[in-house]
Amino acid sequence: MLRSKEKFKEIFVDRIETIYGISLEESSDLEQYTALSSMIKDYIHRNWVQTHKRYNDAKAKQVYYLSIEFLPGKQLGTNLLNLGLTDICKEALSDLNISLEELESIENDPGIGNGGLGRLGSCFLESMASSNLPGHGCTIRYEHGLFRQKIIGEDQVEVIDDWIENGNVWEVRKPNRAVEVKFGGNVKMDNVDGRTVFIHENYDTVLAVPHDMPVIGYNNNTVNTLRLFSAEVKEEVDYTLLSGDETRKSLEYEVAVKKISESLYPNDESHEGKVLRLKQQYFLVSAGLQTIIKRYRRKGGAIRNFYKDIAIHINDTHPSLAIPELMRIFLDEYKLGWDEAWGIVTKTISYTNHTIMPEALEKWSIDMFKGLLPRIYMIVEEINRRFNLELERKYGQDENKKREMSILYHGQVHMANLAIIGSHSVNGVAKVHTEILKNQVMKNFYEFYPEKFNNKTNGITHRTWLLKANPSLSKLITSAIGDTWITKPSHLTDLLRFKEDNSFKEQVMKSKKENKELLQKIIEDKHGISIDTNSIIDVQVKRIHEYKRQLLNVLHILDLYYRLKDNPKLDIYPRTFIFGGKAAPGYFMAKRVINLINSVGKIVNNDKSLNDKIKVIYLEGYRASLAERIFPATDVSEQISTASKEASGTGNMKFMLNGALTIGTLDGANIEIRNAVGDENFFKFGLTVQEVLKYYADGGYNSREIYDRNFRIKRILNSLVDGSIFGTKDRFRCIYDSLLYHNDQYFVLKDFEEYVRTQNKVEQKFKDKNSWAESCIVNIANAGIFSSDRTIKEYAEEIWNIEEVLK
Ligand code: CJB
């Protein structure tokens, strides 16, 4: 019904009239956006229902991907694209003098994730739906997402992200499917028919209300579900019937309940062990599992077959309470014996590790855990007791093994250990990361359970990150090799035939130029700075973290600055350095780095003597929708983490897919990208993983010696504290000290010289347009293996054992 333009217009106008009781002429952009989105949601509702029916009829095994965060990006554009409605919608609206782009821009990005981990989850959901795989997401419906970032002066300022201020048209609230989650209280043991039963009493109840959002597959009638739970009070209280004290208690309870799904923790890869975070985690898994099991039982599933019909994936340790919670349900509600329950649980659950950063490995104080989740704690204790017996059987009384492998140790609950012990599969997210897990971080467990460990290199959905984000390049690719790459991304390698084709190269570079112009307009509008679209567009966008080394990038800019000041005639190719990303509000060093980048930007952008050779832009509020404008316009992708620290990275893949060349360390998936494109199409520099790990084992290196020896480094570092260019003395003392007196933990100075040399190589290559264009094509052509279609296929076949369900 939406396939004809005239019909589309008619339904759209009608929708505005019925929802708002006004004519199209009277309607606001927001009303038009809402009407259009609700119309698209209605359009897919039959397929949504049909998809579930199809899975049921086929008795298909289904996977649920539990994640404390997702980053879906704006829905309207993605959904239109996957439904094949973009063009017709654009034309219909244009007849009515409405711009689809403007309506799309009204939608808020669902801010329910922090960064890579959440976006990976969303790419996986898209790929599962597009591959006809029965897979759904479960998460929390945070009322406030990750803060919105403003750059005021040189600093990041955080503003509340009220992403559902205008409602969320895409969700369907399902109060009749709500479940109860229990916190606190105590557990009483009783004996019923010769069997010990555990009775949880005096607890507080929180209602978990599902809100389902459709996940639409590409052109295949499949619609899976992303389920978001909000925490609500069980029943509204009539305060007129309560005494003063009861009213106070009741209000306190209401506030505490609402807090659970009020906001997302803004820390990326560092967790502080706060009780609210533990509450959120249990809330998610308990609500998720209860609704999964209820549905399973409604459809007639038998608990003893649970693992044959359902797979549950835990995205990092955050949802690892799924293990004891599933045990609780099987033991207490379905009365299974321990061994049978444990067998089912471990065959159902699989776990992905996303980082080796020690501050991200979650630990909870036992006292807090026990108080909040008394029954779950008992189960964890029993899992731990039994596991320790196994350890003893294998290693005797080996205290080291116990310390490193127990779930409960030194007053803490170690979530990664729980996740490994309770799942049948543990995977890392890039080859080198998995090797580090096996040989270092989880060495003991790898020795104990070698069969559990495997690698699944991350991927990104090329439909969002190329087809949608970069229409001009997509058209060009399709004109060259046909459109099968959209569903079979490995076909992108057909482009290799064109790598020496001058006309194709020209067109690729023309498309890049167009994308640069689009980005230039955004930067001009937002920041009032005009960038040279002929310059090298060099980009580092990601969360701000010391290990990601935005600092190395900015030190290189300062080096260029000084070289240009020394010699204004220095022949360097004009370059625009673009940064974007949020720092966790409490992460002091990361915020100083933002300040440094903006301070350098101020100096460089306003210094006429530099003849516009370098520009530095900090893009405010980096998020999924802005990312779609950045990747297509980029020439140089900065992937410069300290080797061993970036588990995989996925931005690196998005840049590559859009024809940017990477300057990168041999870290995470960079290694696999380099292997795919070849050394001549990738700019590698820096210490290797082995070298970094060896330095760590030996207690670090002497950064002072580099400072003393290298005049350029000395001058740059001095400028951080001497007031010469930044006005005040000691302005960046903390950065200076971290590099010189706190061991330069991330090897910034150690890698600096090679980084600068490699940046010179980048510039030389860029001057050779022909060679650059060829490398761009080689990068695009080899990006197919980094599609999440490939990743998800591996998960489906090797971990979840699920199959596609066709009509
Ligand atoms: N990652 O974004 C997060 N948050 C965490 O808490 C832990 C890891 C990132 O996950 C991505 C997806 O696997 C990785 O590509 C990235 O290297 C990692 O930092």
Image: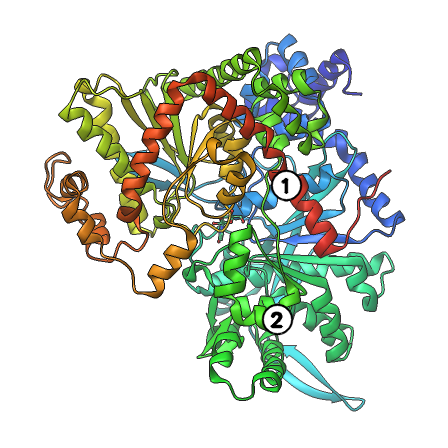
Q: Nearer the viewer, residue 588 or 416?
A: 416
Q: Image quadrant for the N terminus? A: top right
Residue type at numbered disc 2: Ile
- CA–CA distance between discs 1 and 2? 27 Å
- Judge whether 217 appears above or below 39 on screen: below
Q: Position of residue 17 (x, y in %)?
A: 68, 20
Asked where in the image residue 72 lies, by quadrant, the reply is top right
- Judge whether 382 appears above or below 570 on screen: below
Q: Nearer the viewer, residue 373 or 762?
A: 762
The image's mark for residue 421 is 2
State yes or no: discs 1 and 2 in contact (Cβ < 8 Å): no
Q: Nearer the viewer, residue 494 or 383?
A: 494
Give the labeled residue for mark 1. Answer: 788
Residue type at numbered disc 1: Ser
Q: Position of residue 265 (x, y in %)?
A: 46, 53
Q: Image quadrant for the C terminus? A: top right
Residue located at (80% from left, 44% from top): 804
Q: Nearer the viewer, residue 784 or 292?
A: 784
Give the mark nearest the N terminus, 1 or 2.
2
Determine the secondary structure under disc 1: helix
- Judge whether 127 appears above or below 494 on screen: below
The image's mark for residue 340 is none
Residue located at (54% from left, 34% from top): 677
